[in-house]
Structures are given as C-alpha cells and as structure tokens.
Image (spheres, helix red, strand yellow):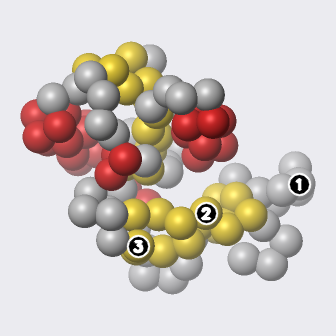
Amino acid sequence: MRGRMAVPVHDMNGTLLAYVGLALSPDQSRYHFPSGFDPQSVVFGAHRVEGEEVRLVGDVLQVLAASQIGEEAICFLTEFVEPQQHEMLAAIQDGKKFKVFY
C-alpha cells in the first residue's frame, strides 16, 4: 500500500475483509488489492446503508465524499460489473429495502 491511501473494505456484517489501496497519482492503477482478495465479492459501503435511497457511484472516493455530506452511496470495486455483482446488489436491496439511484 506504499504510496496509496489505504481504505478498509467490509462485508455486509461489517467485518473487515481487507484494505484496498487507492491511487494517489495518475501513474498508479486505480486500486491495489491484497493477494487473495476478490473485488467482485464486495459492494463497497453496503454494510453502512440504512436509508431508503442509495446512490450507486463510480468509485470509492465518491462513496466517501457522499458520506461527508450526509448521503448514502455504494460502488463496485471493479471496472466492469459482472452478472454476479448485479445479483449481489439485488440481494442486498431485498434485505435492506432501499432503492438505487445512478
């Protein structure tokens, strides 16, 4: 994580899964994941959702910025969204009863 901002990633129960390194300069890749961590297995920020409306945003920094102004947001940690991630998001929505806005 040297030279990156380390951000904790949690599962739906709030259990810490890993730290993801965010790029701090344009020459770095967007995210750095620790070995053994599957970024497709997580919807970032979903463990904190409490309201009825949640914004789906493009990256972790947008989720953090939204929380600073009192809004709820989530994001995927991958460049492309796979079918299993759509299914995971639908299951989270069913359990927490919220609407997703883009």
Left/right of residue 98 with respect to residue 21 in the rendered view: left
Earlier-in-chain disc, 1 versus 3: 3
Name the amino acid, label 1. Answer: Ser
**Percent position (x, y) of residue 39?**
43, 61
3D distance between C-alphas at marks 3 and 2: 11 Å
* Foreground tag (1 vs 2): 2
Give the mark toward the camera: 1 or 3: 3
Residue at (74% x, 64% y) in the render? 5
| In-front residue for pair 73/26 | 73
> Dot 3: within a 10 Å radius of its alpha carbon, few (fewer than 14), some, or many (20 or more) residues?
few
* Tag 1 and tag 2, C-beta contact below 8 Å: no
Secondary structure of the residue carrying tag 2 is strand
Where 51 falls versus 17 (above or below)? above
Residue at the spot of label 1: 25
Residue for badge 2:
7
Q: Is residue 37 above or below residue 48?
A: below
| Quarter of image, res 87 | top left
Residue found 50% across the figure and 27% down from its top = 71
| Residue 90 can be seen, yes or no | no
Instruction: Residue lying at the far front in this picture: please name it.
Output: 70
Distance Cα–Cα, label 1 vs label 2: 16 Å
For the residue marked with disc 2, what is the amino acid?
Answer: Val
Q: Quadrant of the N terminus?
A: bottom right
- Which residue occupies 84% across, 56% down? 24
Q: Position of residue 73 (x, y in %)?
A: 46, 33
Earlier-in-chain disc, 3 versus 2: 2
Label 3, on which residue?
A: 16
Residue 52 placed where, x, y %?
Answer: 27, 23
